[in-house]
Amino acid sequence: MSEAQETDVIVIGAGSSGENVAGRVVAAGLSSVLVESELVGGECSYWACMPSKALLRSGTVLNRAREVSGAKEAVTGKLDAQQVLERRTRMTNNWDDASQVDWVNGAGITLLRGSARVSGERTVEVQLDGETTSVTARHAVVFATGSTPNVPPVDGLAGLDYWGTREATSAKEVPERLVVLGGGVSGVELAQAYARLGSRVTVVARHKLLSNYPPEGVKLVEKGLRRDNVEILTDTATESVRLDEDGRFVLTLAGNRHATGDKLLVSTGRTANTRGLGLEELGLDPKTLTFDLTGRAVDGPTWLYAVGDAAGQVLLTHQGKYEARVTADAIVARAAGTLGDTAEEWSKYTSTANKYAVPQVVFTDPEIAMVGRTAEAAQADGLRVSETSLPITVAGTSIHSDKYTGWATMVVDEDRKVIVGVAFTGPDVAELLHSATIAVVGEVPLDRLWHAVPPYPTVSEVWLRLLEKYGL
């Protein structure tokens, strides 16, 4: 074992959340050790957000051009799949984290490569190539260890060389046929990406597609997938998987149906990655351990924190970064003795938006962009709400595309006359979402929001139409 080290804050996991915690505490005057066993930058940079959106973007741009007269006549070819894959690879820096390491070093953070495990009070052991380094934190240990894919209990799946999202986003070739098991965000996005790259794609979902999103929006996404010749099998159980004599995946489905593919992508959700980190030796159960809105363990050691997917609250990169900033500020304040055990909602020390205003986007074509609560969720929280919905049909959409089709929904708390949820579906609606997020987080009164005039002619005119239909 090498000589023991000491620092103010240990962060396990150098993905986007971990980098943000370490960077922020160091900027505030504390020291930090950042531990990573794989690539610095994490899942989002190399295997999730960035490569998946790069795979989608080329097809979306081509489709936009084909929907505008004058441009569509100039588009005579199809996607160059190899160029799309090469662009994806550039977006991941060819899975080389040298630039991320340079940022860590430049920020004054100490980087340790290796596998980490909590071994005692504020102490972490890092193992690499048979060597163990012990590091003790004066103030906090932060789990930023991300999440791992769920493996569904399908007969025959174990032992097969199927794709997870990592393999799908880093593939060097486009399979002739692809079967996607799972109807969530990643599965649906990658299904459309590969369909546009030339695969014949089948999506098999045990329940509905995108079950956490508004049904009217999901219908438009399903229509877009079918337009790209994606076969969609919903409410369909997968009973078993096997390889045929040609090495193709054969799924036996309920009702004695089958789906066959050269590759099988399993995308059935993810689970916080907190096992194997030493919690059990501390008398803590990773399955039941939770973290409060400052990131600190509930019913656990006061020095233990978690951010990002590891916290198990909202498994989205941008929310993980938000949690990281909040948690870093809380750790710094507690180290200085200016913050106690609790913090007020909407203060700089609590990730309150995780409860009320999570922005999320499905980057299919069309997109679904949503923030806040659905009417059903708001009612379950005891609010008296109304829901206003309409097609996105304004002057801006006719300029945007000859075939623009979209849908918008606004949920209003009738007692306070503020918006608590908004959802948009349509081409490029992700760019509308931050205005909705500001309205929800800021609890902007509707009679004041009425004075936020959308510019003409833009798709954002939908705000005016929603407010008019509401009755303003």
Image (cartoon, rainbow, N blue to C red):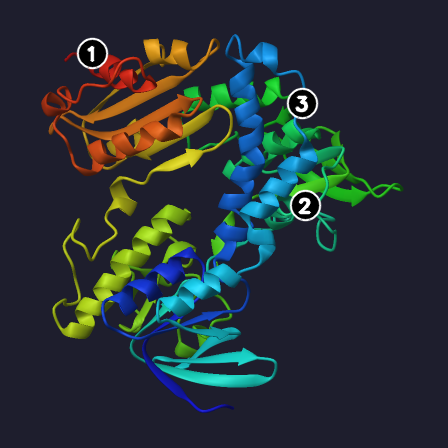
403 w.r.t. 452: above or below: above
Which comes before the other along the chain, label 2 or label 3? Answer: 3
- Residue 335 marker: none
195 or 26: which is nearer to us?
Answer: 26
**Residue under pointer 1:** 468
Mark 1 or 3, nearer chain start: 3
117 or 454: which is nearer to us? 454
Residue type, mark 3 in image = Lys
The kind of secondary structure element at disc 3 is loop
How far is the residue under mark 2 from the one under mark 1? 48 Å
Residue drawn at point x = 51 percent, y = 54 percent:
43
Q: CA distance from mark 1 to mark 3?
A: 42 Å
The residue to which callout 3 is attached is: 78
Q: Secondary structure at mark 2?
A: loop
Q: Decide: marks 2, 3 in contact (CB < 8 A)?
A: no
Q: Dot 2 corresponds to which residue? A: 171
Residue 469 relative to residue 312: left or right: left
Other-residue count near label 1 (Cα within 10 Å), few / some / many at <14 / 14–19 / ≥20: few
Q: Amino acid at mark 2?
A: Ala
Identified by mark 1, the residue type is: Glu
